[in-house]
Image: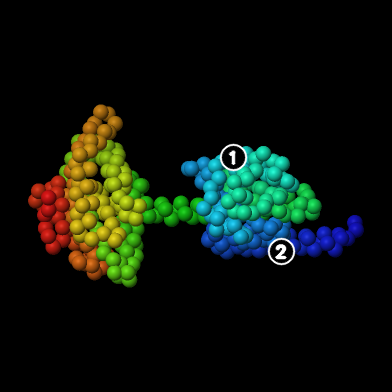
Amino acid sequence: MGELAPNVRLRHMEEVSIFHDVAKALTSSLDLDAVLQTVMDNIAKFFKPDTWSLLMVDEQKEELYFAIAVGPAAETLKTLRLKMGEGIAGWVAKHGESLIVPDVYTDPRFAKRIDEMTKWQTKSMICVPLRSKNRVLAVIQLINSPLESFGDNEMFFLHALCDYAAIAIDNARAVEKIQELTITDDCTGLYNARHLYKTLEAEVYRSQRFNYEFSVCFLDLDHFKQVNDVHGHLVGSRLLSDIGYRIKSTLRLIDYAFRYGGDEFVVLLPQTNKEQAMVVARRLRDIIRGDQYHMDGNVTLTVRASMGVATFPEDAKSAHEIIRQADEMMYMVKNTTRDNIAVAQQGMIR
């Protein structure tokens, strides 16, 4: 058997070196961005495109967005989204098949609007899907690579690198899911008490640094034990889930909702003073009070809640202290009228 030609041998050595770099990144880091950047940098070094990008699939919106983009138009691309099936990358994402297009302007699938927006001139494109479990996770596109040296071996190598990238995405999502499970309450889908104190500590630090106020609302359902006693724990759990959803849907995007335990909930309101927090508390009370909760078996329930409000730094200087203050206010209501709100340093309000 004859020796490989020097240029072929050099190419093989390059491939081995790239595999080593990518495998090392994959096994030494759970940082998805860092691993994908390593994969893409090595792909670019080997295939020498003018520019390249990695588009992630947003399954909920059925769109692709530019997670990594290189070149003069990178900033513009980060604001763009493609519908599944739109453009060559959208077609690859929808059908899960690779494409090599030597002249994009002869291909009806090419999305001319992207070149028009970026002022870039795309001539050729290599587009490859990143697949896992029969799903397309992302698409890699290489723009204006020299195609004269791109054959079956190169496509095999590119697919192998895409497999590495797909593994990285799968790993990152698995880790994200595990982390999410450790901070999420199974019954309501809200954050749990463990995550509450971590979030509060961060909010205390941020508020001290930037001279912000924030408020906490502690909420306890009135007579919830009777629901479990009369209708059973399955109905009780369903009710808690529905109320958790009602609370979360009432809040701003920057707010946090937690299930503290049992039938107790905590709402964290960043950059919110006492007067603003009282408005939120009243709104929560009225929503909970005004709703009817329809359970299985033709059971319809109404719910009331006792609530306490405290504000940082006026009422407390630490995470544990502000929870204690809001909790004490809640118990003031619980031990008297129920179905009302009490505010630190002010007492009961209407």
Of residues 285 and 293, the one nearer the viewer is: 285
- What is the crowding at mark 1: few (fewer than 14 residues within 10 Å), some, or many (at least 20)? some
Residue 82 x/y as whole percent: 55, 45
Q: Which labelled disc corresponds to residue 85?
A: 1
Element marked by disc 2: helix
Is any part of residue 200 visible from this angle? yes
Residue bearing mark 2: 17
> Which residue is outermost to the bottom?
209
Distance Cα–Cα, label 1 vs label 2: 35 Å
Rendered view: 59 above or below 342: above
Crowd rating for badge 2 (residues with CA inside 10 Å; few <14, some 14–19, many 20+) = few
x 56%, y 62%: residue: 34
Image coordinates of residue 333 in percent, x first then y, are 13, 52
Q: In which quarter of the image is residue 8?
A: bottom right
Question: Which amino acid type is marked by label 2?
Answer: Ser
- The kind of secondary structure element at disc 1 is loop
Which residue is nearer to you in this view: 192 or 169?
169
Image: 270 above or below 87: below
Q: In this view, does 210 lie above or below 101?
A: below
Quadrant position of residue 49: bottom right
Q: Which residue is painted at 71% across and 49% down in the image?
A: 124
* Quarter in which the N terminus is drawn: bottom right
Residue at (19% x, 65% y) in the render: 315
| Residue placed most toward the observer, 108 or 274 | 108
Expressed as whole percent of the image width and height from the top left, the position of residue 133 reads 58, 43
Amino acid at pointer 1: Gly
